Amino acid sequence: MLAKRIIPCLDIDKGRVVKGVKFVDIRDAGDPVEAARRYDQQGADELVFLDITASAEQRETLFEVVEQVASQVFIPLTVGGGVRKPYDVRRLLRSGADKVAINTAAVADPSIVSESASRFGAQCIVVAIDAKRVNKKKEPPRWEVFTHGGRKSSGIDAIEWAKEMAERGAGEILLTSMDKDGTKSGFDVELTRAVSEAVEIPVIASGGVGTLEHLQEGLEAGGADAVLAASIFHFGEHTVGEAKQFLTEHGVLVRG
Amino acid sequence: MATIGVIDYGMGNLHSIAKALERVAPGQRVEVTYDPEQLLRADRLVLPGVGGISHCMQELQRLELDELIQEVAGSKPLLGICLGMQALLTYSDENDGVDALDVIPGQVQRFMQPADGSRLKIPHMGWNQVRWEFEHPLWRDVPQDSWFYFVHSYRAVSDKPQHVAGTTEYGSRFACSLLRDNVFAVQFHPEKSQGTGLALLANFAQWDGQA
């Protein structure tokens, strides 16, 4: 049987891990290779790197980081942030990324998804969707796609968008609830479930993880195929191993 | 110095496969190339690949690697990975149907939704357990039901049950590994399957092509 996946996410700026990874026992917490290696040892099923570097020249360091990590850590690596055109996808794949996450660019021009999927294969195209609830109280739930790190509304319905992206060849959806992101109050389970049921491709739930119970909720109630988390792992609150042990004890199949 | 040739026809994460081979076979040279001469000189060959079969076959033909692979398949150890495994079969349903290399007799078919109404996510993406069907040098140090990383929407259906070297459960049991003489093929990505994947690659790097 296919296992549910636990995916730590690292924010990278100018080639360094930011938002502080606080492992007690690594020398340089800002070094993406060390952080990746540590998560690999803990049993992470994949890794996601989100590049938040603003300037184009400094983005070059990202390719080196990806290359170094991919040379030493033999689990799947997804890289996103600032992917604008199929050429960017190609460069990241050539550096050693297994999958590339596309977000804002897909909203600006959805053909980047179809074009990249047909050139490089659907399996390496992850569409990242930042969704925010827009319904009024007492109305049925509705979510819209936001771009530019959640600052701009696109006016597009998130569920319809997920379906369109799957049709255009996305291999996976990375779904972040903008309402929940950073709150540590748990996933938007309703959103996760709605997207999971709407598409045939796997869905990674993201945004809001504060406890191990939240992970279970996203996978079971939310029906997600994988869960992404940053802070509960970064600050040493829990290791990936502890998360897996908890899930196993609660009847969720994970890779041992 | 023994050489492992990684067949580069422009599709797939060759960086990872090369690095993984370098890790497990420090005494060997790993050459990522499409040069037929170099590939023919190598002691072992790896046929990797991700993407669609139609583009894969076109590129192999354009680079005149299709016949080379068919020739090598009769002599030296060859490892097909993911799309590289599917390309070794006779025919694939993907991209409206494509004739493949026919090194291992069989078909490539899309996963079907189970008849019981339960729903399969397609692609089959993530970690799943592999059961080997018989002992083999490539399964050495790979315990029964080890976890490997998969990502694919199509799967192999072998014409001959004796070619099925490993199976995995996804909707139903399917052949995730095939063996024909000196050709070993895996649907999963050993280069992305952490320690167990590296163990399999280490076995391949030592394999003489015999059962």
Image (cartoon, rainbow, N blue to C red):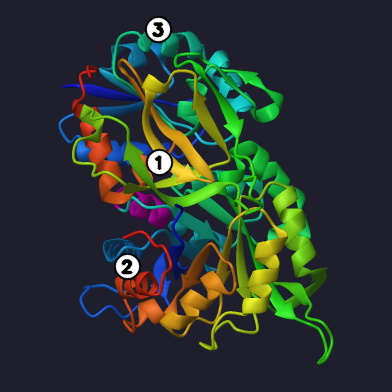
Q: Which amino acid does label 1 sit on?
A: His
Total labels: the figure holds: 3
Above/below status of A23 relative to B189: below
The verdict on residue A219 being magenta is: no
Task: Please report the bounds of the magenta region as a residue range.
Answer: A64-72
Residue at image coords 51%, 15%:
B101
Question: Mark 1 falls within which chain?
Answer: B
Q: In this view, does A239 lie to the left or right of A229?
A: left
The tag on residue B71 is 3
In this image, A92 relative to A245: left or right? right
* Residue at x 44% of width, y 75% of height: A230
Q: Which of marks 3 and 2 is in front?
A: 3
Q: Do marks 2 and 1 share a chain?
A: no
Q: In this view, does B144 lie above or below A203?
A: above
Q: In this view, which residue lies farthest toward the front? A: B116
Q: Do the residues labelled 2 and 1 touch (CB within 8 Å)?
A: no
Amino acid type shown at disc 2: Ala
Relative to the observer, which residue lies in front, A14 or A123?
Answer: A123
Q: Do the residues labelled 1 and 3 touch (CB within 8 Å)?
A: no
Q: How far apart are marks 3 and 2 (CA)?
A: 44 Å
How far apart in space, not on screen, are marks 1 and 3 (Cα)? 24 Å
Point 41% across, 63% down: residue: A253
Binning the other alpha carbons within 10 Å of mark 3 as few (below 14), some (14 to 19) or many (20 upward) gives: few
Q: Which of marks 1 and 3 is nearer the N terminus?
A: 3
State the quadrant of the C terminus of chain A. bottom left
Asked if residue A65 lies in the magenta stretch, the reply is yes
